[in-house]
Image: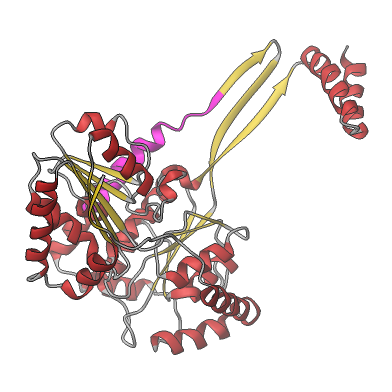
């Protein structure tokens, strides 16, 4: 491997100051409830309405402020997400087998009752994130989805976000951001049903709140700044590769980009394109920082080395700009979502194509995938048996428990042997 450009490392780390700060906020919110919610919302967002929950009239007003084309485009995107989530659900079948004579074992999938969905705002009003947690939860059969999104500082809601949340199926919508929003959903403040699972992306304070709340409720995953990797051979278009790398670089100054090329000539052409496009990019102030600090450009000696480099990076998004995409598709193991061929791009996955954009970052793609309909289902097992089978299994169980010196356990088995033998 040859390094053309090396960037910094981007692992999700718990900053001690952030940990302490979020813990203090959660303690206030836990003990003081809505008084603390209002105080913190005024402090951070200059927002203290009579009610943080939007009424039906306010929701209708927000939707009415959206242009017809925006509404139609949002419906297009959401229907794609809905269609894919329904197809995923159809693969999650109940199971029952007779594992030995008279013994039946099975599993079934049960949706959680309440999901707390966070739709981020901040630098960009990412209203497309609404469908990524709300729709899969609703398709899974979740009864109640409570949603929170930050207010536009001092002025209220962003209409496109409210429209997206409502159309995705949100049952309750709150204009509230940050740690306070996570606490409201997790603790069940302001008459909210406590969430069984919290999901959705956010800044480092939201991510840390989710980490600390895990256990009281479930979470989807811990996500840091976004990242992209591209594997490109000499058949690729360096201008298109550069364009896609910068598409993710504009997210955040801490976003990560990795490009693995198969020749130095192509790598240098891509580097030239990145510099050329950065000069005129409207969001270059952010993208330039991101590429400078965290952009990586490598030349692999072979396809297999390119795969090894990518799998070690374990990117959130991975694009293949290669002639033989099947070779990589069949061998790559670590990524959140894969974009096969130059015809697709990360922005499609983020906004409109139908796969989910809440994905693992910071190498967590080594051990988990992203949000999907199964995230909101509990797979539970059950057992039943005949009296004869109970006697057979009970004799073995009693002996095993006795060896472990768990004598009360052994008795529960032995009494069944005596009853059914």
Q: Nearer the viewer, residue 4 or 383?
A: 4
The image's colour scheme reads secondary structure
Q: Residue at x 52, y 81 (%)?
A: 37
Across the whole image, how many numbered discs are drawn on residues?
0
Position of 33 with respect to 347 (left or right) is right
Image quadrant in which you'd find residue 122: bottom left
Residue 381 appears in the figure = yes
In the displayed structure, 185 sits above or below 301; it is below
Q: Which residues are magenta?
A: 76-95
Spot occupied by residue 235 in the image (x, y as percentages of width and height): 8, 39
In magenta segment, residue 241: no
Q: Nearer the viewer, residue 326 or 288?
A: 288
Q: Residue at x 33, y 84 (%)?
A: 153
Spot occupied by residue 227 in the image (x, y as percentages of width and height): 30, 57
Q: Which quarter of the image is occupied by the N terminus?
A: top left
In the displayed structure, 281 sits above or below 25; it is above
Residue 193 appears in the figure = no
Position of 159 with respect to 113 (left or right) is left
Q: Nearer the viewer, residue 277 or 47?
A: 277
Q: Residue at x 46, y 58 (%)?
A: 222
Q: Which quarter of the image is occupied by the C terminus?
A: top right
Magenta span dominant secondary structure: helix
Q: Residue at x 40, y 86 (%)?
A: 47
Q: Nearer the viewer, residue 361 or 397?
A: 361
Residue at the far front in the pictured view: 2
In magenta segment, residue 81: yes
Spot occupied by residue 17 in the image (x, y as percentages of width and height): 53, 77
Spot occupied by residue 51 in the image (x, y as percentages of width and height): 45, 81
In the displayed structure, 309 sits above or below 271; it is above
């Amino acid at each position: 491997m040859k390094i053309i450009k090396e960037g910094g490392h981007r692992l999700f780390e718990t900053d001690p100051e952030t940990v302490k700060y979020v813990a203090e906020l959660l303690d206030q919110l836990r003990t003081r409830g809505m008084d603390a919610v209002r105080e913190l919302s005024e402090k951070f967002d200059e927002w203290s309405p009579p009610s943080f929950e939007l009424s039906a009239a306010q929701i209708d007003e927000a939707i009415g402020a959206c242009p017809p084309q925006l509404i139609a485009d949002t419906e297009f995107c959401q229907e794609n997400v809905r269609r894919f989530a329904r197809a995923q659900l159809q693969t999650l079948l109940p199971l029952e087998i007779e594992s030995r004579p008279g013994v039946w074992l099975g599993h079934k999938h049960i949706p959680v009752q309440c999901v707390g969905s966070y739709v981020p705002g901040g630098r960009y009003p990412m209203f497309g994130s609404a469908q990524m947690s709300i729709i899969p939860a609703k398709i899974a059969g979740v009864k109640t989805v409570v949603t929170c999104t930050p207010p536009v500082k001092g002025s209220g809601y962003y209409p496109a976000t409210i429209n997206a949340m409502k159309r995705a199926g949100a049952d309750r919508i709150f204009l509230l951001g940050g740690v306070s929003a996570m606490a409201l959903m997790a603790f069940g403040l302001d008459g909210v049903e406590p969430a069984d699972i919290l999901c959705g992306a956010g800044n480092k304070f939201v991510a840390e709140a989710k980490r600390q709340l895990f256990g009281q409720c479930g979470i989807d995953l811990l996500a840091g700044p976004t990242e992209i990797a591209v594997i490109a051979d000499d058949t690729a278009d360096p201008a298109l590769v550069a364009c896609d790398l910068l598409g993710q670089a504009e997210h955040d100054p801490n976003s990560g980009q990795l490009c693995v090329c198969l020749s130095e000539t192509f790598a240098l052409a891509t580097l030239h394109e990145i510099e050329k496009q950065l000069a005129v990019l409207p969001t270059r102030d952010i993208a330039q920082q991101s590429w400078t600090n965290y952009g990586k450009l490598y030349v692999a000696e072979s396809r297999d080395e390119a795969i090894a480099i990518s799998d070690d990076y374990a990117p959130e998004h991975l694009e293949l700009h290669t002639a033989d995409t099947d070779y990589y598709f069949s061998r790559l193991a670590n990524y959140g979502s894969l974009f096969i061929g130059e015809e697709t791009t990360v922005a499609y996955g983020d906004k409109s194509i139908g796969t989910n954009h809440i994905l693992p970052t910071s190498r967590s793609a080594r051990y988990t995938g992203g949000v999907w309909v199964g995230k909101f289902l509990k797979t539970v097992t059950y057992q039943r048996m005949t009296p004869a089978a109970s006697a057979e299994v009970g004799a073995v169980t009693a002996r095993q428990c006795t060896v472990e010196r768990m004598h009360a356990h052994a008795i529960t088995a032995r009494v069944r042997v005596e009853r059914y033998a």
